């Protein structure tokens, strides 16, 4: 039976990640799952951060890296307003990414303090 390219890729990734998973669980315990979830979130959100720039590049044929780049566009043209929308959406996605990272860090810190302090964390 011949394997499809997808099945070959899945087998190759499993061959790499299974030993890494075993070592990670042995070394870090419960924190390994949290680390893996954080890495998955970071990868997914970083890919999301590329979407507005790709839309600008594909549709308008221009690269908008910041609000200063928008000021060089024609004030009456569509590109200037598209630039502002693309840069603002990049900024909003960064806010979401930072919020997720900070909230996960605080939740994990609270759990760690609760385990070490015997359940006293979070009480006034």
Image (cartoon, grey):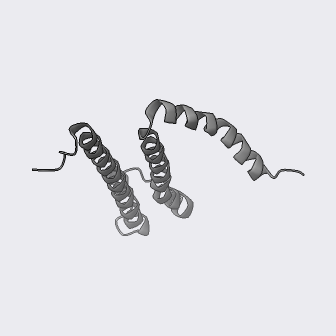
Observer able to see residue 59: yes
The single residue placed furthest to the left in the displayed view is: 124
Q: Residue at x 71, y 40 (%)?
A: 12
Q: Residue at x 43, y 41 (%)?
A: 30
Q: Residue at x 83, y 50 (%)?
A: 3
Asked whether 37 or 46 is in front, the reply is 37
Asked whether 12 or 59 is in front, the reply is 12
Task: Count all numbered tags in the image, as a single digit.
Answer: 0
The single residue placed furthest to the front in the displayed view is: 118
Asked whether 69 or 23 is in front, the reply is 23
The single residue placed furthest to the right in the displayed view is: 1
Q: Position of residue 85 (x, y in %)?
A: 38, 64
Q: Position of residue 103 (x, y in %)?
A: 30, 51
Q: Residue at x 24, y 40 (%)?
A: 113
Judged left or right of residue 4, residue 42 is left
Judged left or right of residue 27, residue 11 is right
> Can you say whether 18 is above or below 80 in the image?
above
Give residue 17's quadrant in the image: top right
């Amino acid at each position: 039976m011949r394997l499809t390219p997808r099945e070959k890729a899945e087998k190759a990734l499993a061959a790499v990640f299974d030993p890494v998973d075993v070592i990670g669980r042995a070394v870090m315990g419960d924190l390994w799952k949290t680390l893996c979830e954080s890495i998955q979130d970071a990868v997914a959100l970083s890919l999301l951060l590329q979407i507005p720039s790709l839309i600008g590049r594909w549709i308008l044929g221009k690269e908008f890296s910041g609000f200063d780049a928008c000021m060089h566009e024609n004030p009456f043209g569509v590109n200037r307003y598209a630039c502002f929308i693309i840069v603002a959406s990049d900024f909003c996605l960064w806010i979401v990414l930072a919020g997720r990272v900070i909230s996960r860090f605080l939740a994990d810190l609270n759990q760690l303090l609760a385990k070490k302090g015997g359940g006293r964390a979070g009480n006034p």
